[in-house]
Each structure stands twice: as C-alpha cells, then as structure tokens.
C-alpha cells in the first residue's frame, strides 16, 4: 500500500508537472474549446493547484486513524476508524473541463492511496493527448495509466475489474457505467448533468445578479454542467434584469462577442447544430448570432413560457439562457420544485426567509446564494450531485473519503467483558434491556 511519503511525493510531483506544462495546457484548451487563458487558469489550472496545495497540507491528518467512543455495552474495548485505498480506480472524464475533471479526481484518488487508470474524453483530443504525455513522461504506470480513445475504449475498460469507478459525464453514459459496474459489484461515483435553476426574487440587486450570471453562464461558452440552465424571475423585474444582462454581455464581450478573445467556442459542430436547433423557434431577446466557421454562438437570452418545451426537457449545455417568469413567491416555489435534484441551484435574494426556505427545502448537489459556480471552486466544499445528478462527493477531504474504504475497527479486551451475552440466556433479558436502552 502507498504510504504517506509516496502519496505526498506523487502529489508534489503532479504540482510541478502541471506548473511546467502551463503553456501547453493553455494551447490545448485554446485548440479544443477556444478557452481564453484567464478562464483556463481560473477554471482548470488554478483549481488543480489549489486542490493539490490543500491536499498536501492536510493529507497526514486525513490519513490518521480516528478514535471514536465505544458504547458501554461493548466495554472494555476501543473503537477506531481507518481509511484504506480501494485499490485500482478507473476515472472516466468528459470534455468540458478536460484537465480539472480528470486531475482533481486523480488527486483525490492518489491521496487515498489508489492506483489510477484515466480515460479522458476523446472529444477534446488535444487536452487528452497532453494529459497522456504529462502522465506517461512523469509517472510510473504502476501509479497512473492513461487510456486514449472513445466509447469502445471505455467499454473495454468497463469489462475489466476495478475496485472503484469514478465517472463524470451524461446521464445516458452514466447508466451504462453503472450497469457494467453492477456486473462486477464495483462501487461507483457518478457526476452527472441536470438543469441547475437560477431563482431571482424582487429583493435582490438585479444589477449584481445580472453581472454574476453573465460571467458564470457564458464562461466556457456555457458548457458547464453547473452553469444556470434557466432563470426564473419575478415578472415585475424581468425587463430591468434583461436590460442589465444586455449591458454586461456587451461590457464583457464587446458589441461583437463572436470575435471576442474572452469568449470561448462550442466544442464541435454536432453540439453547435444541436444548440442552433434549440433556439430555432424561440423568441430571442439578446444574441442568437452564430459563426459556423469559428463554431461560435453568441451569448443568447430567450424567453420561455412552458416548462415542458424541448429547451426545458433537455440539458442545454451551451450559451443559451431561457428566462421564465413568476408572479408570486408561492408560484416560484411550485415551479422550482419540479426541477429537484440538479447538480446545483442558484438563488439571488436579500430576503432571509426565501434564503432559509431554499437552503432547507430544495434538494440539489450544491446551492449558491447571490452568485453562480463559486461553490464548486473550493476544496472546502464537497462537490457532487444528488438523485438524477449523481452520487458521491469529491474535492478536498470529501474526495479523500470517497476514494477510501472507511474501515471500522474495534479492539476488545479479553478480560472484564460482560458475560450476559452468552447462552444459556435464562432470565438475562431484563439485564440486557437495562444495558441496551
Ligand atoms: P459523455 O457521457 O458523452 O462522455 C463522458 C465519457 O464517457 C467520455 O470519456 C466518453 O468517451 C465516454 N463515453 C461516451 N459515450 C460512451 C458510450 N456509449 N459508452 C461508454 N463510454 C462512453 O459526456 P460528455 O459529452 O463528455 O460531457 C457532457 C456531460 O457531462 C453533460 O451531461 C454534463 O452535464 C456532464 N458533466 C457533469 C459534471 C458534474 O460535475 N456533474 C461535470 C462536467 C460534465
């Protein structure tokens, strides 16, 4: 089993490797997704380095076994919780944040002492190839292997025996992964998509909300599983909010966002045409421009009247933001509750009651009040979905725990034990009831 020193050495080396490859990572992300360097650092490299620093700092305390109390009935004894690696772990990643969605699970899995096989997405081929080079040139295959290729490679891997599978991607493929894992009784963590709602009431600062939503929604050209999929806003303030959205889209990306160096592109033509189909019959309020040659769609805001349209039934996963209205808070709650269990949910409000209601009654992988995406960019908060958006939390200590078997150990003393547990029981039940009450 990998000891503390070996794990730390791997993590410190990975930090050096990521830093040494910074320029190559920018280039791969530019080629695959047109990602500006600032976004590449903020949402990929920076997150990986932060996760590494945090893990390196706390790993020794996470690895120590923890002593817990022992019930009186079991005395004399001591109880401890150990964490051991699962063994061989498979990590399957999507294309939208190809580095951090591959390397943060790797950091968590290594911290827990596992051997890892990585399967990056074939769709962002430059990033996948760079991950392959970074790993094969710097780490022994007994610690990490990288398998390049598409679904057929994943299917081959799923036929092999792993001790834990970590999958990030669509619900469709998540179901395949879970089915294959079930054949071998392999535990899985699934990080899936969904439709994160963004609820805005009439008490919040509309200007600040618009600013934050434009930044979070159109980062990575809207291709973020945690970005708001739709806005649900009080009818009374909708027009004002749209004016602010328009203002910030122009302020951030200029009058011609398709040619802004700060705006990424759609990953490929298949997704590009899928997104254009979605807005074909929609009432477009802002944007709607596109450039097939650059595979770009400008930040687009549309009105949506039905909760059952194609737009509302599928994951948009692109730079299109539907706006839906409500008249009363009760109506807003009724509508939002139909979209339970997304990977994230956003609320813009100054009303404490609204905030408390959502935090206590709305089920989502994560909630952020008065901003978007920020809750996912910290190693202190566990990250992961619930229900249809997945299972298992990672990042930081949660990630260390996810990739560990939490092993309970009780050490009993052979002398001084309670003898009433042994047959014949006779009239011992009344004593047992006194002990176990
Ligand atoms: P995907 O499910 O199509 O692919 C994910 C991985 O599975 C890739 O490595 C791919 O090669 C493999 N794969 C694809 N089809 C397969 C098949 N038929 N059999 C076996 N393996 C197959 O997902 P994607 O398009 O790469 O990513 C987008 C999806 O991922 C969205 O649904 C998004 O919401 C989700 N996502 C979720 C999170 C999260 O943290 N919850 C983060 C990023 C992306």
Image (tube, rainbow, N blue to C red):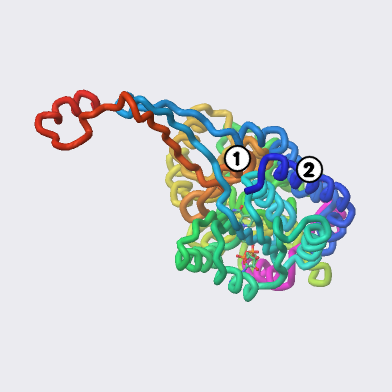
Residue lying at the far left of the rendered structure? 426
Q: Is 349 part of what is drawn in magenta?
A: no
Q: Work out how far the residue at label 1 is from the one at label 2, CA to CA, in angstroms.
A: 50 Å
Closer to us: 58 or 31 = 58
Quarter of the figure with residue 225: bottom right
Which of label 1 and label 2 is nearer to you? 2
Does the image show residue 258? no
Quarter of the image that includes the C terminus: top left
Q: Is residue 108 above or below residue 283?
A: above
Residue found 68% across the figure and 41% down from its top: 377
What is the span of residues highlighted in magenta in the rendered image?
252-278
Residue 179 is situated, as x and y percent measured from the top left of the image, at 47, 67
Q: Mark 2, residues whose alpha carbon is within 10 Å: few (<14), some, or many (≥20)?
A: some
Is residue 45 shown left or right of residue 151?
right
Residue found 75% across the figure and 47% down from its top: 10
Residue annotated with mark 1: 237
Kindly identify which numbered label has been placed on residue 12.
2
């Amino acid at each position: 089993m990998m000891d503390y020193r070996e794990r730390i050495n791997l993590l410190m080396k990975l930090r050096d490797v990521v830093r040494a490859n910074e320029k190559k990572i920018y280039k791969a992300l530019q080629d695959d997704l047109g990602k500006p360097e600032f976004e590449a650092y903020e949402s990929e490299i920076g997150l990986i380095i932060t996760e590494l620093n945090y893990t390196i700092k706390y790993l020794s305390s996470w690895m120590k076994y923890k002593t817990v109390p022992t019930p009186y009935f079991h005395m004399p004894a001591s109880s401890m919780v150990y964490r051991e690696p699962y063994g061989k772990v498979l990590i399957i990643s999507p294309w939208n944040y190809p580095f951090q969605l591959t390397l943060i699970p790797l950091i968590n899995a290594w911290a827990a002492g596992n051997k890892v096989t990585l399967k990056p997405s074939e769709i962002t081929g430059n990033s996948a190839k760079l991950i392959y080079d970074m790993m094969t040139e710097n780490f022994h295959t007994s610690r990490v292997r990288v398998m390049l290729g598409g679904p057929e490679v994943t299917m081959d891997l799923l036929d092999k025996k792993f001790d834990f599978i970590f999958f990030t991607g669509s619900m469709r493929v998540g179901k395949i992964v879970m089915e294959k894992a079930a054949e071998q009784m392999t535990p899985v963590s699934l990080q899936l998509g969904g439709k994160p709602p963004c609820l805005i009431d009439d008490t919040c600062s509309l200007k600040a909300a618009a600013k934050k939503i434009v930044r979070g929604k159109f980062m990575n050209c809207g291709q973020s599983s945690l970005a708001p999929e739709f806005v649900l806003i009080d009818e009374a303030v909708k027009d004002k909010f749209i004016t602010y959205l328009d203002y910030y889209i122009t302020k951030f990306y200029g009058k011609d966002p398709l040619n802004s160096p700060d705006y990424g592109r759609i990953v490929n033509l298949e997704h590009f045409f899928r997104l254009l189909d979605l807005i074909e019959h929609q009432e477009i309020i802002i944007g709607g421009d596109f450039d097939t040659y650059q595979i770009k769609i400008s930040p687009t805001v549309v009105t949506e009247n039905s909760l059952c349209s194609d737009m509302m039934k599928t994951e948009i996963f692109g730079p299109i933001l539907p706006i839906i209205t409500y008249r009363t808070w009760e109506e807003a709650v009724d509508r939002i509750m139909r979209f339970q269990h997304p990977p994230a949910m956003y609320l813009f409000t100054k009303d404490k009651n609204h905030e408390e209601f959502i935090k206590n009654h709305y089920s989502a992988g994560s909630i952020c009040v008065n901003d978007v995406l920020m809750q996912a960019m910290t190693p202190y908060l566990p990250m992961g979905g619930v229900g249809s958006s997945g299972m298992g939390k990672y990042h930081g200590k949660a990630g260390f725990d996810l990739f560990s078997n939490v092993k309970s150990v009780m050490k009993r003393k052979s002398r001084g034990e309670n003898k009433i547990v042994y047959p014949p029981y006779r009239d011992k039940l009344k004593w047992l009831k006194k002990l176990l009450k």
